Amino acid sequence: MTATAPRGVVGRPWRKVDALGSATGRAVYADDMYLPGMLIGKQLHSIHAHALIRGIDTSQAEALDGVHAVLTGADLPVAYGIFPVSQDEHALAVERVRYVGEPVVAVAAVDEETAERALALVEVVYEPLPEVTTYEAALAEDGPRIHGEGTGANIHRSNAFEFGDVAEGFSVADHVREDVLFYSGNNHAAMEQHAAVAEMGSDGRLTLWTSTQVPHYVHRTLEKVLEMPAGHIRVIAPAVGGGFGGKTDPFSHEITASKLAMVTGRPVKITLTREEVFYAHRGRHPVLMWVRTGFTADGRITAMHFRSLLDGGAYGSYGAATTLYTGALQTTTYRIPAYRFEGVRVFTNKPPCGPKRGHGTPQPRFALEVHLDKAADDLGIDPVELRLRNAVEPFSETVNHLRITSSGLRECIEEVTRASGFAEQRGKLPRGRGLGFAIGAYMSGAGLPIYWNDMPQSEVQLKVDRGGGVTVYSMAADVGQGSTSVLAAIVAEVLGLEAADLSLVTADTDLTPIDLGSYSSRVTFMAGNAALEAATKLRAMVFDAVAAHLEVPADSLVAAERRVGVDGDPERSVPWSEAVRLAAAAFGPLTASGAYTPPDLAGPYKGSGVGPSPAYSYSACVAAVACDPETGVVAVEKVWMAHDVGRSINPLLVEGQIEGSVHMALGEVFSEEQAFRGGMHIGPSLLDYKIPSILEMPPVESILIETVDPEGPFGAKEAGQGPLLPVLPAIANAIHDALGIRVDELPITPWKVLQAVRDLERGGDGRVGPAGLPDVPFREPLRVELPQQWQEVAAP
Amino acid sequence: MRLPPFTFLEPATLAEATKMLADQGPAATTVAGGTDLYPNLKRRQSSPKTLVSLRRVDGLRGIRANGSGTTIGATTTLGEVAAAEVLPGAIRDAAGFVSSPQIRNVGTIGGNLCVDTRCDYINQNEEWRRAVDFCLKDRGEICWVAPRSSHCWAVSSTDIAPVAIALEAEIRLASVGGERVIPAEALYRDDGIEWLTRAPDEILTEIVVPGGNGMRATYRKVRRRGTIDFPILGVAVAVDVDGGGECTSARIVLGAIASAPVRASEAEEFLAGKRLSDEVIEETARLAGKAARPQDNTDLNSRYRKRMVPVEVGRALRSLA
Amino acid sequence: MTARLLTLEVNGTTHHIAARDHATLLEVLREDLGLTGTKHGCELGECGACTVLVDGAPWLSCLTVAREAEGRRVTTIEGLAKGPEPHPLQVAFADLGAAQCGYCTPGVLMSASSLLETDPVPTTQQIKEALAGNLCRCTGYIKIIEAVHLAAERAGAASGPGTGGAS
């Protein structure tokens, strides 16, 4: 797509199309739906982390007045999973339970209280098995297996690659540094608990309204598990109360609500409790990481070796991708001539981990940026300068075959350090106060879909009514980020309309053309490009008709301010409504469609499907902290974030994503942890799981950098995930500036800060963190040939 | 999440309320704001048959100053206490630190004085507790915090009590049998299950805060966030200072480290008769730290909470110096 | 447990319904009165999503037994607008992007509207304190704070000298 300069709505701050819906309470979320005759579904969960199911007696529950159906795993025997390689889940446990909170039985009853009473009458006989809840237990060769029979290490995924000659790179290094860091697991904690309402129509078609980010993947899963043709199933995402990756898996309650609706003939709603949300989870993987980097004396990276060990919980979920993501994007910010990555994901008896904002990349980004901050100290080089010396150049290729297009990394670094006064203040503030710096990059949509296919990843259709009204159809689910408004802006910009002139139909598998969903920051770029193409085609038809009417060449026309006419000549123009009448008379049905398929970006090796993206956003962050060395309490005083968004379609929404990312990062760095005692979640509630309140939130200064990506719609790239990445390491680095300590293990609690301070006072290195990785049987790396431009570099 | 079924009674007078409570027996419980009780009921930590609501009982709400001090009716909301200029700053602060604005709009001072003890193992839903097996405080036979203990270690989580004790406030209790007034400290028992000395048929009707000439008091609260969270340590300090700047007496009360508020008696005795110099403050704080033996059953860890006792007591004393 | 008559005044309308004693105000609003604008994020009083006004003060409807609201004025998000005219806070939230997913928004707006009733021109600190019981996961609260300021400014301008004060 060409990046035309916008002259209408694109680039202006404006109100989201649905902004008053939520502000007036009129937006309908799944749990707000009350259908005639609707039953309430509830699920019974495993009370064991690991056990065999020896029997389930549902007879008393079934006999209870008001109960319409009771389901067990036997009723839904087909396995599923988001990835073709990980079809390891059942809607209700079959034969074995693998974590506390796993759904085992589902009932539908006239109301919630009856459903709960029914569940209390269900007898499940378990035969407990030994629990596997630590890395060490998961890796033990003689321990119990969570999937499959017998014993043996519970390794779900194991990947290893080497790009370039790492041994050679380390051998020429003047300085080599190693670090070990731990990033704890955490939950998305979207404010809306997941909810689903299913209804079986009298025509034999099933409709599911569900709070999902990915109607298409839910659709596919229902087709498989319910063994129904996809064409008989309709999945609709109503208003969705936040996702952050937590609503990108197909979930048990979506399938069981559907099945219950099928067997009862009544609509069925299942709304998860907050506790159940923590069990459904799919949150950030805990990752233990080891990184070794070689540098020349002047700070240029000669080689990097990165290892990650992921605790995946009980099922695959997105873990196959997550594992690869912990190694894929290090090279998108730094020019690393030789790179080796080894990653292993283990199964444990805990709720399954999956994708959360940044999917598998915040963990290595935290490790890398802290590691580089330490390396800068070792080398006596300013940490900003160290980054600049290694910064990836725009329009280049990384050693692991990632194509980089536009990059505002340098501008981000320059702007954020200037705005924050980083150079003037770092290292010069009184004890307890400090500044930290870090950078990051993220994908504007994954280059490859979750299941292999060569069809478009996004399609958008437009239809014009006789009065000039334009309806936009897209399956992309707006989960609060404003994706629907972004599509509206793009269409309105091209057609010279206002976003309010459009009718938006989204996230409905019956009515809207494919979009893979709101994950991997893909909607603005991919659905945006599809919308741009559709609108451009529609405009071409309108221009042709108006050109004939005005007797001017079509390429002299512009569409702006609800008129179509000769550029710069208001006398020779017609209102939009008149223009579409001319076009309908000339061409018949006024519809247009557009599609987006990413370029073929995969590298020449197996495993290269994760990491490529048509464009990367770049961020640079400075955080200011005030630490209390007596209490260990750290307050973040301010965050500066420069973000290369390519083109800001709507600055309000971009700033909102940055501010929200800072908030989420703040929780992850200090207080949020999906913590367990054995297999028991320590506090599955919003009281115990501590999301920062308004009182903890610092001011955020957002600096939007526009590099106008050649392939993004109007040059736009992502904004929803990238800005989270540098916040955590910037804060950790700021704490080091403030107190001279290193807490290399998240969350950074007051107690860890105090331990590090005490260690420093006693002459230690002032570090708290993991000592090393356990004995992980990383596989022998796949040696991948270098990209052409790197071969030339390596040759002399 | 649904509340368990109960009958909700709304007496209009104290006499009616005490009679209802006496008639219903132990299956009844009083409720005022309900911000502590209702979550516990939703988690099925208990299932009373009858709730006797005090919210509409005449005369239980309001703040009255008189010659010797101030009387706060039990159903006065925490928000009203926090805003009452007639009250000592320490008790206003403590009320203002409780949970969130919404909770303070309905939660009452009487409710906070009586707030149920809390523990990582009890404030969980029924299914969770079944998974680990129930504990001493509800249906079980073991304390998961201290498995060899025959005692429940659930934590006193009131913000008001430490201040009330430090201010030497008194509590008025009423039942069909009459009224009694006890020192605030005597309301508590170091037992996570029977944490109050209030009889089941008694209603806490008011708290009387004495007016102290020369008394200075403060309350400090440790928790993760500046809102919503219960205390994981509360420090209330009141000192009586004479004209010469000497502490004639002191009360140092630690909240949220045991099943009842804890007096740091050794520290209090050390401080008596001394000026609040840096050295005296440091030693007082150190001695106060010895009084705390928290368990690992709240947010953060017990070692951290213990370490914070001298820090917070020191800061409290410095703010009073 | 039998149901009893419950009389509630919600958004200026008196409703008579049958409810069991243990029904919460949240359940009655959503399930009996169809006022689904009031949300729930935890049902345990920990997130603020279910905030409504009772006699003008923010209460958590998930921790309110519906019977306790009898004889009091209940205002929900549906009652904030004057007919088709949105409340200045609603407009400001829309204008500034203070609602992203929108799920916490009704609760936030109820807390904020109560604040503006008592403090028409609040400071940032007052806004933070008033909203300290409302968790938001999307916005980082920044645009929420800005929107409350904006609504206060606009209300001030609308009722300032020359308009409201002339008589």
Image (tube, rainbow, N blue to C red):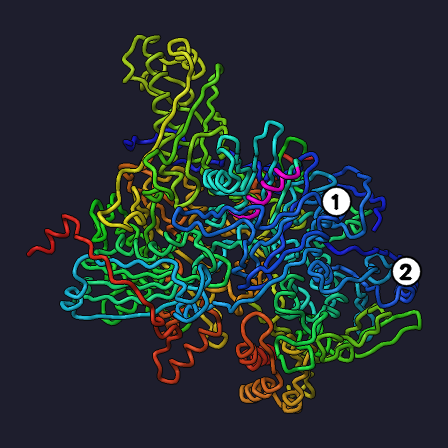
Picture quadrant where residue A111 is located? top right
Residue position for label 1: A66
Residue C156 visible at all? no
Instruction: Using the numbered discs, state the Cα–Cα distance from disc 1 to disc 2 in whole angstroms.
Output: 40 Å
Q: Quadrant of the N terminus of chain A?
A: top left
Q: Chain of mark 1?
A: A
Q: Are marks 1 and 2 in contact (CB under 8 Å)?
A: no
Amino acid type, residue under disc 1 in the picture: Gly
Residue at mark 2: chain:
B
Return the x and y of residue B185 as percentages of the image width and height: 75, 79
Residue under pointer 2? B13
- Viewer-closest of B83 and A674: A674
Would you identify the image quadrant in which residue A155 lies?
bottom left
Label 1 in the same subunit as label 2 = no
Write the residue at 16% across / 64% down.
A169
Other-residue count near label 1 (Cα within 10 Å), few / some / many at <14 / 14–19 / ≥20: some
